[in-house]
Image: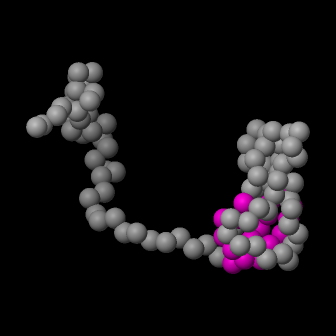
């Protein structure tokens, strides 16, 4: 059974025509997707990532961390979120960010 698009009733212009009128054809990518694993050699993770309080580092420069390890936390009486290592490696700097080198 062929089902119409869920927004069929609210559409006034065919999608292909709208795409052409907005000149979005230059963004069409018909190539095959390639799965590529991103493995950065260094990351800088900011301690202030949102409107809450900046996180307090729980690691020092020279510490070895694994991916997922807690590297900064927020005191319980303040708004914020804990920060975890996105890669494993050595902490090379702790300032207003934590730098980890793989």
Examine the structure image and report whether residue 94 is included in the region drawn in magenta.
yes
Residue placed at 85% from the left, 77% from the top? 62
Q: Is residue 42 visible?
A: no
Residue placed at 31% from the left, 36% from the top? 22
> Which x, y percent locates residue 60?
88, 69
Q: Main secondary structure of the magenta part?
A: strand
Q: Quadrant of residue 40?
A: bottom right
Given residues 48 and 65, the one toward you in this image is: 65
Can you say which quadrant of the picture contains the C terminus?
bottom right
Tell me if residue 19 comes above or below residue 86 in the rendering.
above
Examine the structure image and report whether residue 32 is included in the region drawn in magenta.
no
Tell me if residue 35 comes above or below residue 51 in the rendering.
below
Model colouring:
one colour
Residue placed at 37% from the left, 69% from the top? 34
Tell me if residue 62 comes above or below residue 13 in the rendering.
below
Q: What span is colored magenta in the figure?
A: 84-102
> Which x, y percent locates residue 8?
22, 26
> Which x, y percent locates residue 89?
72, 77
Q: Is residue 2 visible?
A: yes
Residue placed at 83% from the left, 69% from the top? 93
Relative placement, left or right, of 61 versus 11 is right
> Which x, y percent locates residue 18?
26, 34
Can you say which quadrant of the picture contains the N terminus?
top left
Relative placement, left or right, of 47 versus 24 is right
């Amino acid at each position: 059974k062929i089902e119409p698009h869920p927004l069929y009733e609210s559409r006034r212009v065919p999608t292909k025509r709208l795409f052409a009128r907005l000149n979005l054809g230059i963004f069409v990518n018909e190539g095959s997707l390639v799965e590529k694993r991103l493995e950065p050699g260094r990351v800088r993770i900011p301690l202030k990532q949102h409107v809450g309080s900046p996180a307090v580092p729980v690691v020092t420069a020279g510490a070895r961390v694994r991916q997922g390890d807690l590297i900064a936390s927020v005191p319980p009486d303040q708004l914020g979120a804990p920060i975890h290592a996105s890669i494993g490696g050595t902490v090379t700097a702790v300032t207003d960010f934590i730098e980890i080198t793989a």
